[in-house]
Image (cartoon, rainbow, N blue to C red):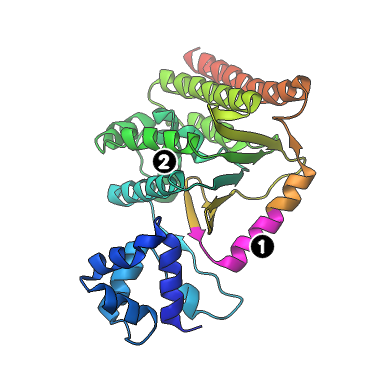
Amino acid sequence: MDLQKLLFKEIRSRISNPSHWSKEISDLLHLGRDAIYRRERCEVQLTIHETETLCRHYGISLDSHLLSDRTQVVFKHTSLNQEDCYNYTQYISQLLLHLQRMQACERKEIIFCADDIPIFHFMDFAELTYFKLYTWNQAVLNLGISYEDFVYALRKQHLEPVFHKLYESYRKIPSREIWTLGTIGPILELLEYYQAIGSFANPQSLRLLLEQLRCLTGNLKEWTKTQEKRPGVAFDLYLSPVNLGLSQMLCQFDDQQSVSVKLYTINSIATLDRRYVQETKDWIKGVLNKSSCLSKLSEKERIQFFNHMEDRIACLAERLDLQQDKLKA
């Protein structure tokens, strides 16, 4: 199919009100409706400027259409680091916009395969979210500052209202999450490691993070028990018997689908590539078939899973308290 026809087809699929698509593009390009129809029928070629304007406005990558090689997949990626806070602000703002667009759709669902706790759960707890950001920046940039100094600097960016909006947006989208017994492991390992190397200037910081982690698992427990994130918004938690190997998020809304793959501690890459999306859907279907739905199992099995997580948090808290007592002695 002609590239220009493909571009218009994809744009039309991204416009919430199909009957107004020509007016929306007409306003964007400052052209009459007849001129837009002629371009859609390929009677008139889009200029480079018009193509760039459309692709930037609707978030379309021409590479996904130009690269016909079946071994190539185009991903979107935003680099994150403390040296340029604008990048992170842009990243979470784009993520929020994506979720808000999903909210507006009639049919929508997120399926999250989690070998680490999905970032949306952290967003209800600013200090935990800052800690995830801190560990990533320390690993990449070796900042040489304490966790508390990092939080002090980041609070000036006024990110917490965006965290809250992200959390609330996620709560408004029906979801299924697939966890393992090890999903809580990465955050516990990070807390223990950064305590061991002296990254916390204030012992109360670590206690606060552990308490927030307990509250996070408590929220998840309530969602799982009621099968709702909030009234009318469905939620199911699945327990996979084997390690997932990576974290992936499949977003399905109206006729669109995308996949995000977690990188490192907080970052991710995303693609709309239909082949990759379909392969991911097939993989998720296989994982779901092997997993147990904790939302629908007996209370005993559900309690065992959450007791396991609570015990791991308690054991870490006990070990860290003992280490601090030894340092004082």
Q: Which residue carries the number 1 mark?
A: 279
Using residue 224 as the reference point, say whether residue 98 is left or right of it: left
Tell me if I can see residue 283 in this picture: yes
Residue plotted at (57% across, 19% down): 317
Residue 19 on the magenta span: no
Residue plotted at (46% across, 84% down): 2
Q: Position of residue 62 (x, y in %)?
A: 42, 74
- In the displayed structure, 230 sits above or below 116; it is above
Say what secondary structure mark 1 lies in.
helix
Few, some or many C-alpha atoms within 10 Å of disc 1 (few <14, some 14-19, many ≥20)? few
Few, some or many C-alpha atoms within 10 Å of disc 2 (few <14, some 14-19, many ≥20)? many
Residue plotted at (36% across, 40% down): 144
Q: Earlier in the sequence, mark 1 or mark 2?
A: 2
Residue plotted at (53% across, 35% down): 190
Q: Position of residue 74 (x, y in %)?
A: 50, 69
Q: Furthest-left residue in view?
A: 30
Q: Which residues are magenta?
A: 270-283
Say what secondary structure mark 2 lies in.
helix
Q: Position of residue 218 (x, y in %)?
A: 57, 21
Using residue 169 as the reference point, say whether residue 108 is left or right of it: right
Look at label 2 and name its amino acid.
Leu
For the stretch drawn in magenta, the main secondary structure is: helix
- In the displayed structure, 276 sits above or below 320; it is below
Q: Position of residue 92 (x, y in %)?
A: 38, 46
Depth check, front residue: 199 or 171: 171
Q: Which residue carries the number 2 mark?
A: 133
Q: Can you tell which quarter of the image residue 127 is in?
A: top left
Look at label 1 and name its amino acid.
Glu
Q: Can you tell which quarter of the image residue 51 is in?
A: bottom left
